[in-house]
Amino acid sequence: MPIKKLRNFSDNEIKAHLFVALDQLFKNDAFLLKNKAHERSTAHKLAEYLQRFFPSYHVDCEYNLRGINTKILLRKCNGENKEKVFPDIVIHHRGCDDNLLVIEIKPSKSSNVDKCDDAKLIEFTKQTGDYKYQLGLFIGFNKLDKPQIVWYKNGKQEEE
C-alpha cells in the first residue's frame, strides 16, 4: 500500500477542532447524550461536525479497512488475539497510510478507559505499528456532564 503523508494539522489544531465539534454535539444533539442513545448515533453526529474542520480528509464511522484489507489488531485486553476492529470514528485518507485521528467513544462512562479501548488506541497510535495514527482519543460521555477525554500519542496515553 503506498504511503501518502498529507498531514497538515498540528496536534493542537486537531484538539481545538475536536473541542469545537464536541460543543456542537452538546448544543445540537443533547437528546442523544441525555437519553443514552447508542454510541453509533453519537459517533455519527460527532463525525458530521468533525468533517467540517477536516474537509480534505475522510471522516468515517466504524471504518474497518486498511487499504483494501480488513483492519486487524493484536489486542491484549482479552488475552492476545488478533481481532478485526472497527474504530468508532477515524479521520484519514482512505486507501493509504495517512491516518490523522482515531476515536473510541462510550456513553455513560464514569470510570477510566476500559482495557480494550485502551489497548486499541495504544496500537493504533504506535508509530512502529501498522496504522500510525497521529493521535488517538477516548471520549467517555456521562449524559450532559463534561465528558472524560483521554488523548493518545506514540502508543501511549498523554499526560494531562
Image (tube, rainbow, N blue to C red):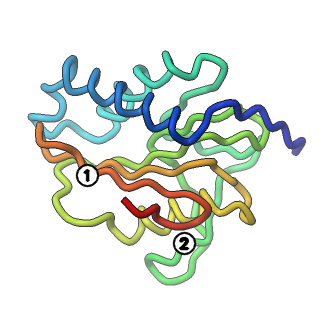
Q: Which residue is mark 1?
A: 148
- Residue type, numbered disc 2: Arg
Looking at the rendered image, the quarter that the C terminus falls into is bottom left
Q: Secondary structure at mark 1?
A: strand
Name which residue lies at 60% across and 57% down. 125
* Few, some or many residues within 10 Å of mark 1 (<14, 14–19, 20+): some
Residue 7 in the image: x percent, y percent? Answer: 71, 35
- In the foreground, 111 or 80: 111
Name which residue lies at 28% across and 21% down. 24
How many numbered circles does the render carry? 2
Name which residue lies at 21% across and 22% down. 29
* Few, some or many residues within 10 Å of mark 2 (<14, 14–19, 20+): many
Residue 14 in the image: x percent, y percent? Answer: 51, 35
Residue 98, quarter of picture? top right
Q: Residue furthest bottom?
A: 79
- Would you place residue 139 above or below residue 122 in this image? above
Left or right: 26 as drawn, with respect to 138: left
Mark sitting on residue 72: none
- Would you place residue 46 above or below residue 78 in this image? above
* Of callouts 2 and 1, the N-terminal one: 2
Left or right: 135 as drawn, with respect to 111: right
Disc 2 versus disc 1: nearer the observer = 1
- Residue type, numbered disc 1: Gln
Residue 145 in the image: x percent, y percent? Answer: 12, 42
Q: Which residue is mark 2?
A: 75
